Image: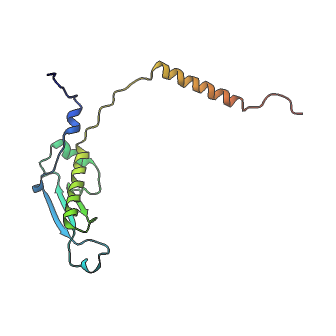
Amino acid sequence: MAAFFLPAFFAYTTRVLVVPENEIELTAVRSQGAGGQNVNKVSSAIHLRFDVRASSLPEQVKEQLLRLGDQRITRSGVIVIKSQQHRSLEMNRAEAIARLNALVAAAAHVPKKRRPTRPSFSSKLRRLEGKRRRSSVKALRGKSGLPDS
């Protein structure tokens, strides 16, 4: 059986950080907008609060999260997400947690380092040929040099 080795960059793309449920504070609040007779009785929106500094996330991810400059992150380092898209409390709860996980995943993403490359010889020739062709087309637009009669 042949050995299978993963490239070095693959380790970053498969690492998924999931925020532990015990570090998230969920509060049910009343939704805004129309809702009929039920709107004043049912608390179906969710306020999610997550303290980044007190969390168990790796230090690099914490720093990246706090550096994001997202409007949902307070000055004290607490992420506040309000979800009221759905009519049910459970669906709003799931959406708020999914949004938090997406935010953490975006902060944990390490972009691939760019390796500088040079244009190939043939691509340089193609570019110069295109410039010559364009130059000749524009030169033909000029005055012909013949006297007007």
Is the residue 63 above or below the residue 36 in the image? above
Percent position of residue 146, x then y: 83, 28
User: At 16% across and 48% down in the image, what residue appears?
Assistant: 18
Q: Quadrant of the C terminus?
A: top right
Placement of 126 over or under 108, stated as above or below: above
Task: In this rendered view, identify the residue nearer to me: 91 or 144.
Answer: 91
Q: Residue furthest right?
A: 149
Q: Position of residue 116 (x, y in %)?
A: 37, 26
**Where's residue 68, x and y in %?**
28, 48
* The N terminus - image quarter: top left
Residue at x 56% of width, y 23% of height: 128
Model colouring: rainbow
Toward the viewer: 52 or 46? 46
Q: Position of residue 14 (x, y in %)?
A: 20, 38
Q: Residue at x 23, y 46 (%)?
A: 105
- 62 shown above or below 43: above
Height in image: 92 above or below 134? below
The answer to which image quadrant residue 26 occupies is bottom left
In this view, the residue farthest toward the left is: 22
Residue lying at the far front in this picture: please name it.
1
Q: Is residue 133 left or right of residue 26?
A: right
Q: Residue 23 falls in which quadrant of the image? A: bottom left
Query: In the figure, residue 39 lies in which quadrant?
Result: bottom left
